[in-house]
Image (spheres, rainbow, N blue to C red):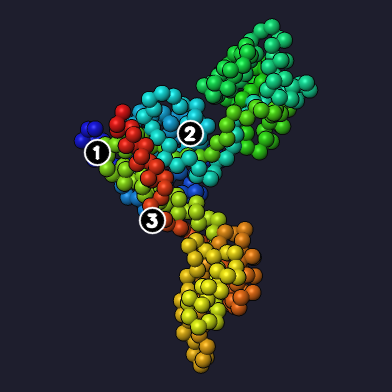
């Protein structure tokens, strides 16, 4: 690694446009890593919480290429484009494979008028009767080829850098393979999915250049920070903190009552502290447990059933573990890569 590479800021590339770009900025802000971009036309920004990191905005497909060649250290993009680029001897690793936004799936879609085509098997039977290569419009040539390789389908991939959905209507292709989220775009273009035609599920992922992580300690430190922020937010987004006051002789008695009488007991157990009450000869304690949002009402009722009062429920912003499992997994991947 050159001195120039070691001295420059760590670079992370984010999607530059579309729904994925908007959701990515929202996710980073919710994670505590708000992007500062004074000029909306600029393709560079920064993260005040990470002063040593420069943000670059690129097309989702270009992010994978940039991380692969080492000009960008980290990238957030869709798993679909990562999987399309996957092969032997990759120079990037997936650090986090489930950021929770950008959810979609890569699907085969046929014209609505093909009434006899309802599955991949019937599609192949129908296509083989045409006595010519079956034309599939897609941007995912590697994934589609891999999907159909085990079959006897005689197919031809048709390049489509623009709107894929229009290809069958104008006779450019027989069917398409593209990412689907709500399915409205397919319906608007009189297309439909078929059984067994889903190639993969996709959502936003965090990737990094493998060689940079192996040779640059600042990059590895940044990887841990990103994982910490993302995991703390993702764990917390489904959690609530429930507080209640309870009478009892001591914290152990209160805790035992909770263990014996409730099914919701927090992450490791309840946090119990004494409440200083003026002019009251009874001992009061404050109980705090962390629960999922789906269990909120159940938790409140169970605490009230054993004497809890003044129950307060507040959102949880972050939950930090001792060490994120994903970071340990990354270190293991890098150790294996270093041994090769």
- Give the CA distance from mark 3 to mark 2: 33 Å
**Callout 1: SS:** helix
Q: Nearer the viewer, mark 3 or mark 2?
A: 3
Residue 46 shows in this picture: no
Contact (Cβ within 8 Å) of mark 3 with mark 2: no
Task: Say above or below: 142 vs 205.
Answer: above
Helix, strand or loop at label 2? It is helix
Label 1 packing within 10 angstroms: few (<14), some (14-19), many (20+): some
Look at the numbered discs 1 and 3 and tell me whether their residues touch, using CB distance below 8 Å.
no
Q: Nearer the viewer, residue 174 or 171?
A: 174
Provide the residue designation for mark 2: 60
Earlier sequence position, callout 1 versus callout 3: 1
Q: Residue drawn 66% across and 20% down?
A: 175
Which quadrant, please, contains the C terminus? top left
Residue 198 location, quadrant: top right
**Residue furthest out toward the top:** 131
Q: Residues within 10 Å of mark 3 (few under 14, many from 20)?
A: few
Q: In the image, 231: left or right of 314?
A: left
Task: Look at the numbered disc 3 and give the secondary structure of its residue.
Answer: loop
Q: Which mark is residue 42?
A: none
**Which residue is labeled 3 in the image?**
322
First in residue order: circle 2 vs circle 1: 1
Q: In percent of the image, x 59 and y 37: which residue is there?
A: 104
Residue at (60%, 70%) from the top-left corner?
A: 261
The residue at which mark 1 appears reads as 6
Label 1 to label 3: alpha-carbon separation? 29 Å
Say left or right for 323 vs 275.
left
Position of residue 238 measured from the top left corner of the image (x, y, whole percent):
55, 56
Q: How much space separates mark 2 and mark 1, taking CA atoms?
A: 26 Å
């Amino acid at each position: 690694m050159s001195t120039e590479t070691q001295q420059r800021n760590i670079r992370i590339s984010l999607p530059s446009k579309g729904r994925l770009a908007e959701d990515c900025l929202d996710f980073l802000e919710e994670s505590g890593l708000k992007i500062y971009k004074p000029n909306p036309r600029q393709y560079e920004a920064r993260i005040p919480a990470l002063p040593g990191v420069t943000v670059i905005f690129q097309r989702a497909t270009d992010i994978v290429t940039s991380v692969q060649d080492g000009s960008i250290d980290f990238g957030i993009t869709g798993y679909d484009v990562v999987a399309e680029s996957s092969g032997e001897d990759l120079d990037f690793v997936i650090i986090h494979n489930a950021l929770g936004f950008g959810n979609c799936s890569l699907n085969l879609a046929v014209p609505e008028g093909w009434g006899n085509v309802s599955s991949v098997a019937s599609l192949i039977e129908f296509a083989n009767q045409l006595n010519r290569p079956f034309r599939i419009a897609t941007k995912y040539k590697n994934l589609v080829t891999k999907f159909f390789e085990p079959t006897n389908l005689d197919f031809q991939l048709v390049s489509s850098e623009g709107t894929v959905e229009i290809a069958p209507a104008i006779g450019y292709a027989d069917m398409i393979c593209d990412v689907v989220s709500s399915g409205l775009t397919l319906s608007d273009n009189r297309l439909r999915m078929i059984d067994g035609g889903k190639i993969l599920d996709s959502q936003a992922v965090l990737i990094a250049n493998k060689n940079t992580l192996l040779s640059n300690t600042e990059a590895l430190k940044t990887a841990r920070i990103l994982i910490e922020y993302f995991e703390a937010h993702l764990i917390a987004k489904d959690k609530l903190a429930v507080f209640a006051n309870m009478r009892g002789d001591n914290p152990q008695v209160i805790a035992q009552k909770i263990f014996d009488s409730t099914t919701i007991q927090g992450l490791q157990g309840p946090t119990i502290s004494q409440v200083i009450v003026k002019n009251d000869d009874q001992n009061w304690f404050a109980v705090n447990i962390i629960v999922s949002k789906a269990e909120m009402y159940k938790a409140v009722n169970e605490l009230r059933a054993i004497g809890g009062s003044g129950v307060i429920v507040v959102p949880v912003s972050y939950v930090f573990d001792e060490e994120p499992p994903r970071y340990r997994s990354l270190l293991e991947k890098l150790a294996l890569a270093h041994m090769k």
